[in-house]
Image: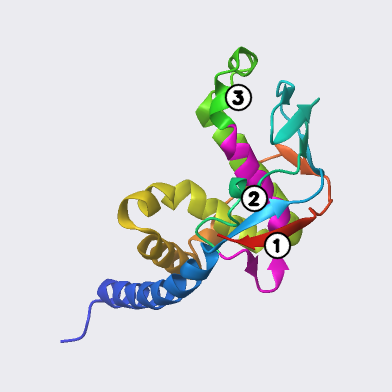
Amino acid sequence: MGEFPLMADMTKLFKIAAGVGKAAYRFYKKDRDHYVRLLEPYTVGRFLVDVPDFDCELFTLREGVLTLKPAEARHCDGATLAPDRIGGVDFASAYIAHDFWYEMIEAMAADGRFKEAGLDAGGLRKIGDAMLAAQMAVKSRFWAGVYYWFVRRFGWLARRMGVVLAMGLASALALAGCAGCVELPGSVFEPSGEEPVYEVEPR
């Protein structure tokens, strides 16, 4: 008796997931062995939604323009759950800004001005993820879609089931076409087009 079509498709899917999972384990160890130090101020771009001005150790936010400050390397460990480069494309302009933003979410959420603007911690994470997608889309819209889809759909899975399994499953689904139909966030952030000046340090 032949396999049911659905079972055959699922078998193929999990074989893909297993193969990608093994590859994910190899680059995961390499991906977690370093920090990224920002060496010069870096103007990331402008938020196109109302955000209060904010000044902290990692960045300034003035009239929606986000400018990162040089800081200790511990604040950025590269692209989380993914390689820093994909297909020769360097996504430092995205992951440095994303890490700095996430580092200060709790401080911003505790600021009454952000509460008045309707931005709690969840809202700040959402526009931070939108910023990540916008920055990545400048380099590669396809990989921006995969990253954004993974962060929004599988972040909880990575925390509960482990990075390698989650990345393998997410990548398999992406290859199967699930990420191809993802819609990136609308006009939330406008990248400056600048590139950060940084160096990589061993962890």
Q: Identify the mark at residue 108; answer none if there is no mark.
A: 3
Residue 123 x/y as whole percent: 56, 29
Find out whether residue 24 is within the magenta segment.
no
Q: Residue at x 44, y 49 (%)?
A: 155
Name which of mark 3 and mark 1 comes first in the sequence.
3
Q: Which residue is identified by label 2?
A: 73
Residue 151 x/y as whole percent: 50, 50
Marks 3 and 1 close (CB-CB < 8 Å): no
Instruction: Name the kind of residue labelled 2 in the image.
Output: Ala
Residue 2 x/y as whole percent: 20, 86
Q: Nearer the viewer, mark 3 or mark 1?
A: 3
Secondary structure under tag 2 reads helix
State the separation of the CA atoms marked 3 and 1. 30 Å
Find out whether residue 94 is within the magenta segment.
yes
Q: Which residue is identified by label 1?
A: 140
Instruction: Name the kind of residue labelled 1 in the image.
Output: Ser
* Magenta region: 83-104
